[in-house]
């Protein structure tokens, strides 16, 4: 997969954006590679979690302006069709995706991070939603994720002004989950991913699915989804194992089924 390092550690699939010479700028080939890796994770029963990180000085600088400048509206429309496919794949895969970000993260790189389920950031991270500086709007799902994460008025403010957001501010706003020193970031994120991958992965997948659906459905619809999913989960090995482990005062040994 061009521009990516993909490797599996236990039940975690690690995907590293590996174009450090262009600060992991996003292009069609990179997004196709991400889609291919996610499809592998989706189909592989031995992958229970995904970790996405970036090599070099930054997680991702977003779109390559030199390539954008050469494109026409038809090219852009087609390219964002692939983007739509990627972001939907990230949302719909019933396995948690942990984003591990650092450095100056810009434009579509910020939005790619927001499409993850959990975000760990280095202390040096700065998020640059710089679209308005070049007369554009967020893509990669940015308009969807930002408003639902930090609220409507903060979203308008940072998109109007394109002011960078520090890791500490992002944490305070609930935009990211954890901050770590850069040297510890990847190991902390991998440790978290490994912990999730050893958990009741079928239940975790359903939690992800219903949490995502809850922000675009009303209460009655969510209650009905809870009702039907809970009835299925009650029949799983992991539910029985969790109950037995609790009663026997031991750690459960989940199998993801």
Image: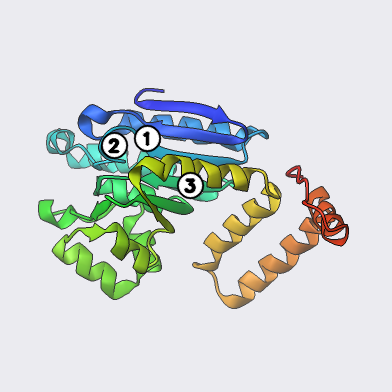
Place of residue 39 in the rendered image (x, y in percent of width and height, measured from the top left)? 54, 34
Residue 112 visible in this rendered orientation of the protein: yes
Residue 111 appears left or right of 223? left
Residue 84 visible in this rendered orientation of the protein: no
Mark 3 or 2: the one toward you: 3
Extreme-top residue of the structure: 2
Q: Secondary structure at mark 2?
A: loop
- Based on the displayed image, in which of its 4 quarters is residue 83 positioned? top left
For marks 3 and 2, the one nearer the N-term is 2
The residue singled out by tag 1 in the image is 31
Residue ID at (24%, 35%): 23
Residue ID at (68%, 35%): 45
Q: Secondary structure at mark 3?
A: strand
Residue 85 appears left or right of 232? left
Quadrant containing the C terminus is: top right
The local crowd at label 3, few if under 14, some if 14 to 19, many if 20 or more residues have their Cα within 10 Å, is many
The residue singled out by tag 3 in the image is 98
Residue 21 appears left or right of 35? left
Q: CA distance from mark 3 to mark 2?
A: 18 Å
The local crowd at label 1, few if under 14, some if 14 to 19, many if 20 or more residues have their Cα within 10 Å, is many
Q: CA distance from mark 1 to mark 3?
A: 17 Å
For marks 1 and 3, the one nearer the N-term is 1
Place of residue 211 in the rendered image (x, y in percent of width and height, measured from the top left)? 56, 63
Place of residue 239 in the rendered image (x, y in percent of width and height, measured from the top left)? 80, 55
Contact, CB < 8 Å: mark 3 with mark 2?
no
Q: Secondary structure at mark 1?
A: helix
Q: Choose between 211 and 124: the one closer to the eye.
A: 124
Q: Choose between 119 and 43: the one closer to the eye.
A: 119
Residue 212: which numbered mark, if any? none
Contact, CB < 8 Å: mark 1 with mark 2?
yes
Place of residue 49 in the rendered image (x, y in percent of width and height, measured from the top left)? 57, 42
Residue 26: which numbered mark, if any? 2
């Amino acid at each position: 997969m061009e521009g990516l390092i993909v490797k599996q550690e236990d039940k975690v699939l690690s995907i590293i954006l590996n174009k450090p010479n262009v600060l992991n700028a996003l292009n069609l080939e990179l997004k196709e590679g991400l889609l291919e890796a996610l499809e592998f994770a989706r189909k592989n029963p031995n992958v229970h979690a995904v970790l996405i990180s970036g090599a070099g000085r930054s997680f991702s600088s977003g779109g390559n302006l030199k390539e954008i400048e050469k494109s026409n509206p038809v090219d852009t429309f087609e390219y964002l069709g692939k983007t739509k496919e990627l972001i939907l794949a990230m949302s719909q895969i019933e396995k948690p995706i942990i984003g591990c970000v650092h450095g100056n993260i810009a434009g579509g790189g910020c939005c790619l991070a927001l499409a993850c389920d959990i975000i760990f950031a280095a202390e040096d991270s700065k998020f640059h939603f710089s679209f308005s500086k070049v007369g554009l709007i967020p893509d990669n799902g940015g308009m969807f994720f930002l408003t639902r994460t930090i609220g409507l008025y903060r979203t308008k403010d940072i998109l109007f002004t394109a002011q960078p957001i520090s890791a500490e501010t992002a944490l305070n706003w609930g935009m990211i989950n954890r901050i770590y020193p850069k040297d510890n970031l990847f190991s902390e994120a991998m440790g978290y991913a490994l912990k999730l991958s050893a958990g009741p992965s079928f239940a975790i997948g359903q939690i992800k699915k219903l949490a995502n659906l809850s922000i675009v459905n009303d209460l009655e619809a969510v209650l009905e989804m809870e009702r039907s999913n809970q009835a299925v989960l009650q029949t799983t090995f992991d539910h029985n194992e969790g109950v037995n482990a609790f009663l026997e005062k031991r750690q459960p040994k989940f199998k993801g089924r």
